[in-house]
Amino acid sequence: GCYVKTFRLDQPLAPGERLSVSFKGAESAIAVWLNGKYIGYGTDSFTPSEFDLTPALVVGDNMLAAQVFKWSASSWLEDQDFFRFSGLFRDVELYRRPATHAEDIRVSTTVAADLKVARITLKVALTGRGKVKVSLRGVVDFEETQPGVFELDVRDPHLWSAEDPYLYQVA
């Protein structure tokens, strides 16, 4: 199917700022245009497809168009245990990214065999110029062990379980 949406940009983006669109679910492939300029193509119905619209963006009215394809080179991988439909079936988000922002954050944990220490590792991909400070609320700040990698050992961690679904908050 084809989808068209017009939106207005009243003033130019700040230097280094980007405007992106994220299609959270498009089955099974999607092609995107902004103001008649081809932006990109994405496959995989269940993973968001994100596109940077900045190169085709204008101050004033902008026309975003998307064509969703029922069949694509990857659709046979998904077509094993359900009926194939087509279209946008999750949210579509338009968002601005400042010049400096966290592009990606990955959190992993390793718990010692005796359950007395948990090591928390954060990997932060930063776009632009700036610094990252990470802390575990109520515990301590993380130590940056290499650029973009922060680690913290938590003694006697409060471990999550179905009976006690405790979560730490990283800020």
Image: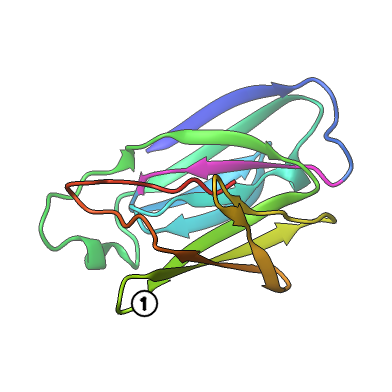
The residue tagged 1 is 112
Question: Based on the displayed image, in which of its 4 quarters is residue 147 positioned?
Answer: bottom right
Extreme residue toward the right, this view: 15
Give coordinates of residue 107: x percent, y percent: 49, 62
At x 36% / y 77%, what residue is drawn? 112
Q: Is residue 47 left or right of residue 39?
A: left
Q: Nearer the viewer, residue 102 or 165?
A: 165
Q: Secondary structure at mark 1?
A: loop
Residue 21 in the magenta stretch? The answer is: yes
88 lies left or right of 42: left
Please check the rendered image and state whether residue 24 is part of the magenta-colored stretch, yes or no.
yes
Q: Is 42 left or right of 152, judged from the image as shown? A: left
Decide whether the magenta segment is chiefly helix, strand or loop.
strand
In the rendered view, would you say 163 is above or below 132? above
Magenta-drawn segment = 16-26
Residue drawn where x is 65% and y is 39% of the image: 34
Which of 107 and 73 lies nearest the eye of the viewer? 107
Q: Vertical placement of 81 versus 58: above or below?
A: below
Residue 41 against residue 151 in the figure, above or below: above
Neighbour tally class for label 1: few under 14, some 14-19, many 20 plus, Cα within 10 Å: few
Return the x and y of residue 137 as percentages of the image width and height: 55, 45
x and y percentages locating residue 114 in the rendered image: 30, 77
Q: Position of residue 1 (x, y in %)?
A: 37, 38
Amino acid on which disc 1 is placed: Ala
Viewer-proximal residue among 34 and 51: 51
Residue pictured at 35% horizontal, 55% vertical: 158
The quarter of the displayed image where residue 125 is located = bottom right
| Residue 134 relative to residue 71: left or right | right
